[in-house]
Amino acid sequence: MTPAQDDRSIGELFAELSRETGVLVRKEVELATTEMTNKAKVAGTHAGLVAAGGALAHAGLLVLLAAIVIGLAQLGVTPWLSALIVAILTMGIGYFLVNTGLTRLRQTSVTPTQTVESLKETARWQTKTPA
């Protein structure tokens, strides 16, 4: 069986190669943009955990300050003790949320791995020589 004959000139073949390369590059850029957008959304979610933890820690500090004020005003009356317990618990939860968010942010990769793999595959395909 003989290979099919192509009647196109070298100029036409290079023009087609140029067009196809342009399409490929545009698709690679589109993939990179999509992948980076998705990764930014994940990082934003993790940053939200950090913000929530910070807000709770701040609330805990306010409750702690209220407990100190009540404790000093009452000098030993027990209502301040309950405020102190609430403050410590609130700050502990806030610390946990901040730690969790920061840990997840550190683990979030911003490298567009699909795009890198696609570019590597394209490079391998382009460097192949016909057998």
Image: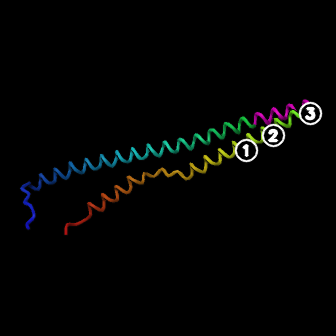
Mark 1 surroundings within 10 Å by alpha-carbon count, few (fewer than 14), some (14 through 19), many (20 or more): some
- Asked which secondary structure carries label 2, the reply is helix
* Residue depicted at 89% across the width and 35% down the height: 78
Q: CA distance from mark 3 to mark 1?
A: 25 Å
* Residue depicted at 29% across the width and 49% down the height: 25
Colour style of the rendered protein structure = rainbow
Q: What range is drawn magenta here?
A: 61-75
Percent of width and height locating residue 20: 22, 50
Residue 29 against residue 9 in the figure, above or below:
above
Percent of width and height locating residue 114: 39, 53
- Asked which secondary structure carries label 1, the reply is helix
In the rendered image, the residue lying farthest to the top is 73
* Residue depicted at 57% across the width and 42% down the height: 47
* Left or right of residue 42: residue 30: left
In the rendered image, the residue lying farthest to the bottom is 131
Percent of width and height locating residue 117: 37, 57
Q: Which residue is mark 1?
A: 92
What amino acid is labelled 3 in the image? Val
- Asked which secondary structure carries label 3, the reply is loop
Q: Which residue is mark 2?
A: 85
Percent of width and height locating residue 57: 71, 39
Q: CA distance from mark 1 to mark 2?
A: 11 Å
* Left or right of residue 107: residue 55: right
What amino acid is labelled 1 in the image? Gly
Is residue 118 shown in magenta?
A: no
* Residue depicted at 27% across the width and 61% down the height: 125
**Which quadrant holds the N terminus?**
bottom left
**Which quadrant holds the C terminus?**
bottom left
Q: Which residue is mark 3?
A: 77
What amino acid is labelled 2 in the image? Ile
